């Protein structure tokens, strides 16, 4: 998990971590909370910027550079969170991206009005200062983003899935149950996974 957070493949290095004993066992289980991309959408909305999630999908990465979305599920056409579907099928290769620069990572795609783009960039800059980021690619008005067409009146933003660090545990066949956008928590109660803010790489197109 340390290598995941120092790679920059996350929305934030701030997490919640608890342990508890497993009933009728000497073993423990861990409850790990990460920050979800919905947090960013909520901040946009509070600042007067409507952010519309369009797709959950998988992004191909080559030589540490995001190339394009290879799989997409529309939020309008599914009753489950799209990212859940891809993770359940074991389609990610986050560890490969960390180790070789090549692989597949989960991400979400949303659009905002293009007239709000400069304000959005300013908000993202402020969030970055406190340790919330995760933007993979952001387009200008009507500009295609990682292979996805965008309406002329809108700007597209691809943000890494909040549970990306946990995908590595599933790739290593650890027994893990992941829930997306499951609950709310106070940011001030989260702690840095380790001191990675000065070390993180950026995965921008």
Image (cartoon, helix red, strand yellow):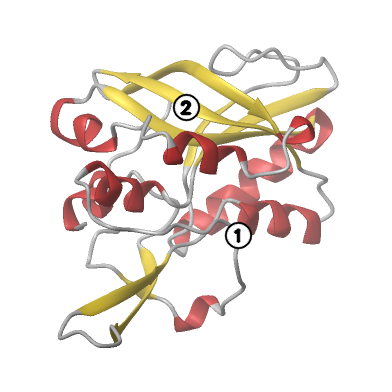
Up-down relation of residue 33 to residue 144 (above or below): below
Picture coordinates of residue 178 (x, y %)? 45, 57
> Left of 181 or right of it: where is 78?
right
Mark 2 or 1 closer to N-term?
A: 2
Q: Quadrant of residue 66?
A: top left
| Residue 181 - label | 1
Residue at (79, 55) in percent of width and height: 45
Q: Quadrant of residue 27?
A: bottom left
- The crowd level at tag 1 (other Cα within 10 Å; few <14, some 14-19, many 20+) is some
State the residue in front, 193 or 48: 193
Inter-mark Cα distance, 2 to 1: 18 Å
| Residue 127 - label | none
State the residue in front, 69 or 88: 88
Residue at (43, 52) in percent of width and height: 163
Picture coordinates of residue 32 (x, y %)? 37, 69
Q: Quadrant of residue 111?
A: top right
Screen quadrant of the C terminus? top left
Screen quadrant of the N terminus? bottom left
| SS for dot 2 | strand
| SS for dot 1 | loop
> Left of 145 or right of it: where is 150?
right
State the residue in front, 65 or 83: 83
Task: Residue under label 2, please give it.
Answer: 58
Residue at (34, 37) in percent of width and height: 202
């Amino acid at each position: 998990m340390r290598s995941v957070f120092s790679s920059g493949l996350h929305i934030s290095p701030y997490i919640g971590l608890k342990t508890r004993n497993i009933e009728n066992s000497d073993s423990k289980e861990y409850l790990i909370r990460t920050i979800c991309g919905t947090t960013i959408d909520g901040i946009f909305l509070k600042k007067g910027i409507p952010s519309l999630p369009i797709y959950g999908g998988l992004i191909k990465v080559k030589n540490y550079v995001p190339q394009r979305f290879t799989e997409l599920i529309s939020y309008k056409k599914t009753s489950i969170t799209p990212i859940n579907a891809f993770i359940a099928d074991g389609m990610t290769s986050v560890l490969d991206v960390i180790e070789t620069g090549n692989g597949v990572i989960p991400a979400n795609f949303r659009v905002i009005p293009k007239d709000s783009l400069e304000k959005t960039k300013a908000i993202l800059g402020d969030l970055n200062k406190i340790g919330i980021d995760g933007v993979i690619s952001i387009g200008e008005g009507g500009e295609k983003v990682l292979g996805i067409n965008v309406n002329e009146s809108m700007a597209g933003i691809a943000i890494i899935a909040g549970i990306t660090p946990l995908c590595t545990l599933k790739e290593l066949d650890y027994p893990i149950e992941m829930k997306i956008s499951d609950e709310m928590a106070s940011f001030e109660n989260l702690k840095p996974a380790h001191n990675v803010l000065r070390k993180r790489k950026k995965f921008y197109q």
